[in-house]
């Protein structure tokens, strides 16, 4: 067994882990980063949309696919409401790989196809299985960016995050399109359906809460046929993917001892939209900065400052989204789920979402 010492161990090389590893390494820390996938970012489990503030991370070759300028939200009545919605569609694998490459170029040691098999938090040691054998790592700080089913969180005895399931097809796009389409319907309990164009193809998918309905394939196939019949997309399915999205809001604690949680592992994904790339990158960068402040500058408040900063940025919006999910739970599989007002209250494109008006239970 080989033993390695490092300042920072980063577990997970999605956007949060990649940003954390790149930032910490760039600031002069000795970083070891591990990723369970053989190739960073593959397979893609994402709708691949990023907001404009992340455009600086879309400059690498092969990352940017197209610009998005609007959103069309379809309600149960058939009403379609168009709203401004600016952002970029990216190749998510290339996006993640660009962050990982920046970390490696800054001096981070990378291990792919590798998993943590044991964590001794008291001794700040982790044992990992790699293609080259077992590696024993002693770290000063660990940044957990290993997704909604975080192994690190489990090893620390922290509760599992609530999740919904997603299923997505990549399909040919018949004509160029610069908006995202969102379907709000009783057919997608606990979630919604989407079409995100990306040049010659589009990501067509849906998310659903398995407590209300577990059969996503039938619903997604029906939507696909509907769009094929409308002449909007082709019948071929170019790629299939899916995964879990955390929807319970932020973890009660983002820092446990010398372990920092970032991205999905921290519960920073938006519980209504499922958007999580921006929060992952921001929290990853901030975690890398906190690591430097603690380990190089001796700032003993650095980890507490990280937690305070992330909560200041995201706690309010995440709490609102969690509350809207709770309200919607009263409507699923009832006649209220066919009511436009219920869905307007539960979707970010409508003013009702941000107001203190009636709840879904009241509307029902």
Image: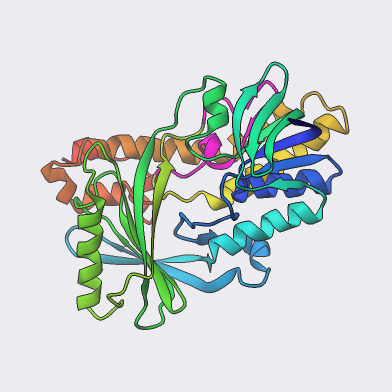
Q: Residue furthest bottom?
A: 175
Given residues 114 and 184, the one toward you in this image is 114
**Magenta segment includes 256:** yes
- Quadrant the N terminus occupies: top right
Given residues 223 and 349, the one toward you in this image is 223
Q: Is residue 57 above or below residue 145?
A: below
Q: Where does the image place residue 65, in percent across and percent down from the top left?
A: 54, 73
**Magenta segment includes 227:** no
Q: Which residues are magenta?
A: 251-271
Q: Where does the image place residue 364, in percent across and percent down from the top left?
A: 16, 40
The number of discs equals 0
Q: Where does the image place residue 248, in percent across and percent down from the top left?
A: 42, 34
Position of residue 156 in the picture relative to residue 44 (left or right): right
Q: Where does the image place residue 97, in percent across and percent down from the top left?
A: 64, 59
* Residue 79, visible in the rendered structure: no
Residue drawn at x 52%, y 25% is 154
Q: Tell me which corner region of the image, top left, top right, bottom left or bottom right, holds residue 5.
A: top right
Q: Tell me which corner region of the image, top left, top right, bottom left or bottom right, holds residue 308.
A: top right
Q: Residue furthest top?
A: 122
* Residue 179, visible in the rendered structure: yes
Position of residue 79 in the picture relative to residue 148 (left or right): left
Q: Is residue 167 above or below residue 136?
A: below
Residue drawn at x 38%, y 70% is 238
Residue drawn at x 61%, y 45% is 35
Q: What colour scheme has been applied to the protein in the rendered image? A: rainbow
Q: Is residue 64 above or below residue 337?
A: below
Residue drawn at x 39%, y 38% is 163
């Amino acid at each position: 067994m080989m033993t390695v010492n490092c300042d920072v161990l980063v577990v997970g090389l999605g956007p949060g882990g990649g940003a954390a590893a790149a930032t910490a390494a760039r600031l002069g820390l000795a970083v070891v980063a591990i990723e369970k996938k053989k190739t960073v970012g593959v397979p893609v489990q994402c709708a691949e949309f990023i907001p404009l503030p992340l455009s600086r991370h879309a400059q690498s070759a092969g990352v940017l696919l197209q610009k998005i300028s609007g959103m069309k939200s379809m309600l149960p009545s058939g009403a379609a409401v168009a709203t401004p919605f600016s952002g970029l569609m990216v190749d998510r694998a290339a996006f993640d790989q660009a962050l990982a490459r920046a970390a490696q170029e800054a001096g981070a040691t990378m291990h792919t196809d590798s998993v943590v098999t044991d964590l001794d938090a008291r001794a700040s040691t982790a044992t990992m299985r790699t293609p080259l054998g077992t590696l024993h790592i002693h770290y000063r700080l660990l940044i957990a960016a290993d997704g909604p089913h975080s192994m690190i969180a489990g090893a620390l005895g922290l509760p599992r995050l609530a999740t919904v399931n997603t299923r997505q097809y990549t399909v040919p796009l018949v004509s160029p399109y610069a908006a995202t389409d969102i379907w709000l319907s009783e057919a997608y309990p606990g979630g919604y359906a989407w079409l995100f164009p990306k040049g010659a193809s589009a990501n067509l998918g849906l998310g659903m809460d398995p407590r209300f309905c577990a059969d996503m394939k039938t619903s997604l196939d029906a939507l696909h046929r509907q769009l094929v019949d409308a002449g909007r997309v082709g019948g071929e399915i170019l790629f299939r993917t899916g995964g879990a999205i955390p929807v319970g809001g932020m973890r009660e604690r983002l820092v446990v001892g010398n372990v920092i949680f970032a991205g999905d592992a921290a519960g920073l994904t938006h519980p209504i939209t499922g958007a999580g790339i921006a929060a992952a990158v921001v929290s990853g960068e901030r975690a890398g900065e906190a690591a430097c402040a603690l380990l190089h500058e001796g700032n003993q408040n650095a980890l507490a400052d990280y937690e305070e900063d992330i909560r200041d940025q995201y706690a309010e919006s995440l709490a609102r989204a969690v509350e809207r999910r709770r309200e919607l739970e009263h409507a699923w599989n009832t006649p209220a789920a066919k009511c436009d007002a219920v869905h307007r209250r539960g979707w970010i494109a409508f003013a009702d979402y941000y107001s203190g008006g009636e709840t879904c239970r009241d509307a029902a």
